[in-house]
Each structure stands twice: as structure tokens, then as C-alpha cells.
Image (cartoon, rainbow, N blue to C red):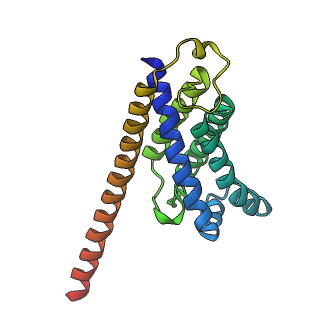
Amino acid sequence: MVELFALGSRFALVILFLSAGLAKLTAPQEFARAVRNYDLLPARRVGTVATWLPRLELLAALLLALGVLTTLAAAVLAGLLLAFTAAVAVSLLRGRQLDCGCFGSTAPRRITWATVARNLVLAAMAALVVAWSPDALSLLPAWSAAAERPVATGDAVAVLATSTAAVAGALLLTEAVRVRGAAATLQRRVGEGAR
């Protein structure tokens, strides 16, 4: 059972970080602005972080997808998630209201304590992948204790489909809530303007 949850975590992290990395790469100036807005890095480092962070996310996601260097890729993502969590928490404690920059400018979202909780859950999922190293549907099998407990290919495909559907559903639901809130705000402003 743990191996299936670790495998589902691996696939969920792949989808999330492919989405996040690609979104950031398609709007580099906006992502650099989001990094700068946190006001946690020296100005000369913002461009470097904004340039290389999406590439690192994509590389780690691709390695997880292929099942190559799975433990290392998951450890990198866990570290990134903990760094993101610290940046959001510091900004919230400073009373700052900013876009998290999580999925680039395609899905601007204000940071909240829910962002911190979400990142901690994702970091725990990455830690599970580090500890378990699920190698089902991998190009290279893992050389660990997990390799002695292989997941059947059919089960792995089912977990992949379920993880994909769950992440896609969560992203769509989050976007629907955001769009609904924006529509309500616009409708309220239009109503106020008509008076």
C-alpha cells in the first residue's frame, strides 16, 4: 500500500512541476517580478533564480517521470518545496500580500497560510518518494529495498491515471474558484460603477 502511495506521489509531483516549470518559462519577466516581490534575495540574484528555477523544476520532474535518479530528483523537489514554504511564511509574517508565482503568470494566486500547508504536504510527498524510491514505469529500476517489492505494471498504470486525474482536477477546481472570485469582483465593480 505504501508503495502505491509513493508511486502516486511521484506521478503527482511530475504533473505539478511540469506544469509549474513550463508556466514560469513561458512568462520569464512575470516570474522574475514574482521572485523580486518576495524581497528575500539580493537584486543581483533575482534574474539567476528566475532563469534557473523553472529549468531545475522541469529537469527534476522529467527525471521523476522517467524514473531516472528518482531519489535525487525527489530530494531536490522536497528541498525546493521547503524553500518555497519558508519564503511564503516569511512574507505572510511580514504582512505582505503577493502573488505566489507558483504557476507563473498563467494562474496568479495570492499567498495564504493554505499555500504553506499545501507546500508542506507536497514536501512530505516528495520525502515519501525519497524514502521509498518507487521504480514502476521507470527506464531504470531502483537499486534499493523498494526494488524487492515491485508494483505490477497494471497497478502502476492505474496509479498514474488516478494521480493525473486528481492533480488535473485539483488544478481545474482551484482555477474555477479563482475565476469565480474574479467574476464576482468584476460584477461588484460594474454594479458600483452603475450607481
Q: Position of residue 90 (x, y in %)?
A: 59, 47
Q: Position of residue 78 (x, y in %)?
A: 61, 35
Q: Residue furthest right?
A: 44
Q: Is residue 118 above or below residue 107?
A: above
Of residue 73 and residue 36, the one placed in the foreground of this image is: 73
Q: Is residue 38 above or below residue 163?
A: below
Residue drawn at (57%, 43%) of the image: 85
Residue drawn at (61%, 48%) of the image: 87
Q: Position of residue 6 (x, y in %)?
A: 50, 26
Report the side of 154 relative to 63 (left or right).
left
| Number of numbered labels in the structure image | 0
Of residue 75 and residue 88, the one placed in the foreground of this image is: 75
Quadrant in which residue 160 is drawn: top left
Residue drawn at (64%, 70%) of the image: 29
Residue drawn at (73%, 61%) of the image: 46
Q: Is residue 191 above or below residue 80?
A: below
